[in-house]
Image: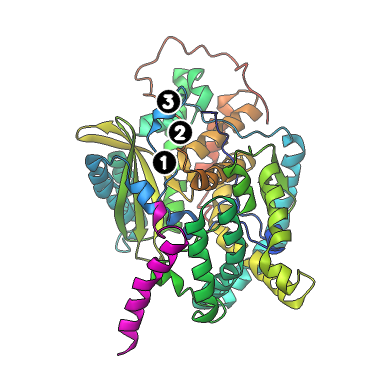
Amino acid sequence: MHSQPRRRALQLLLPILLGALGGAPSALAQEAGARAREPQAEQFVQAAAQRVVSVLADRGLSLAQKEATFHQAINELADVPKITNFVLGKYARTITPAQRQQFATAFRTYAEGVYQKRINDYRGEKLTVTGSVVRKPGDVVVNTTISGGQLDQPVAVAWRVLGAQGSWKVVDVQFKGVWLAITQQQDFVSTIDNAKGDIGVLIAQLQRDAQRPSASR
Amino acid sequence: MTTKRYEGCSRRRFGLPALAAPWMILAAPATALAQTDSPTVAPANAEPQSSSVAETPYDPWHAANRPVFAVSMEVDKGVIAPVAHGYRRILPAPVRKSVRSAIDNLGEPGTVLNDLAQGHPSRAGVATARFAINSTVGLLGLFDVASRMNLPYHESDFGQTLGRWGAQPGPYIYVPIVGPSNLRDGLGRIVDAFTDPVSLLTGGVTTTLGAIRFTATTVDARVGADSAFRALKDATDPYATARSAYTQRRTAVVQLATGEAEVLPDFEPAPTAPSANTAPSPNPTAVPN
């Protein structure tokens, strides 16, 4: 009975005390909120990314159903051709058309397997948009949190979205300060570098990895 | 604006545990950057000319780093990972959560010092209030009561402080067993270890408390890093992947302190049809690293 008002008093008092120390505790959040937002990109992420999260959290689906639905949800969410081109880094300029086609197929299979697993590590149920930042027109980072499910606390996930009116697509996703497509690019470029520029080596490795029965543990 | 390297980062811990608490490649707890809402991303008006190629981390010592990485991964597989997995199996989640809260709590005084050194007195105020509340009401830090009072957890370290005042990360270093680092952040961890108020008051790892803290920090950090370790297994070049992730994270951590915008590469449209400029030649720019 008594604890409730006391706690409320403490909640009121603390910001005042902290304010005296030099500022409000939520200064960081305010900095982020002060910049321009992009409601359409936010709505897109809310819908399309929520679909991906829901597919992964859905225990009612069989593995095959999950994979098929995930594939479809990724098509709606992500700009697959752009990402495929991006992860090749400097080699995007030298790859042959035939290799490009091989790479696209191998990368798609590999990435779906890997990211399905990885997102499973962060299995949550509810995606909430917390804001967005317009980097430049048509280039927006949408900040979200994923919560519920097996998560004991919300996880912050940022989505880089490119596009314009009504047509947005995700090109990169950030957890804990790390962008996945950038990391993937540096992984692949280093692999090709180590093979003295032979893109075929990377393609072969991706094809091999995709055949491996789940390497999740 | 100078081009920023993707710097590194670790889930650093103050005190001697900082030297141990390792592999924190991606190991940061979800909270470390979470509560700040990715403020590292800002309008790109000051961005240098666009490029679709992310800058490769500066790694002049890769010839030494790669074998150290390989051996460390084997040691992890044989010794450290089994210990961490055993810890996770034996102790129920609420107990592990309390262990983590207690470790985090002992790091708060060090965070306060670095917040002040970075010129962020309000953040220092939050860490101070958290330490006071969690050490008392939170029963010696076992319960993170402060988070529920709108005082979210954050970490600040001396590598970040150096970055805040303009220090570049310098060469990437893979420290045996301990994990990825760079010159600036490695030095930062040593300074953090020697200036940690809790260690100064209670003694370092040679004391019982220090040894318990060191061990708990190490095991907790490895458990936290488990999904990162699994992600490394999927990489085509795990060394480059760990380096990239660590470096990006450290960049993000420093940008939390500076408030600067993150420099991101561009995504160019993919060629739609077979194009003319795709000569099938070996690439002259290939540099093994």
Indicate which disc residue B264 carries.
Answer: 2
A68 sits to left or right of B182: left
Q: Dot 1: what SS? A: loop
Look at discs 1 and 3 and give the one toward the viewer: 1
- Is residue A25 inside the magenta stretch? yes
Compare residues B194 and B284 and report the one nearer the observer: B194
Task: Report which residue position mark 1 lands on.
Answer: B41
Establish if B120 lies above or below A205. below
Q: Which x, y percent locates residue B205?
A: 76, 69
Q: Dot 2: what SS? A: loop
The three-letter amino acid code for the residue at tag 1 is: Val
Q: From mark 2 to mark 1, how far is it between C-alphas?
A: 9 Å
Q: Dot 3: what SS? A: helix
Contact? badges 2 and 1 (CB < 8 Å)? yes
What span is colored magenta in the figure? A1-28
Q: Which x, y percent locates residue B252?
A: 51, 45
Compare residues B101 and B221 and report the one nearer the observer: B101
Task: Report which residue position mark 3 lands on.
Answer: A101
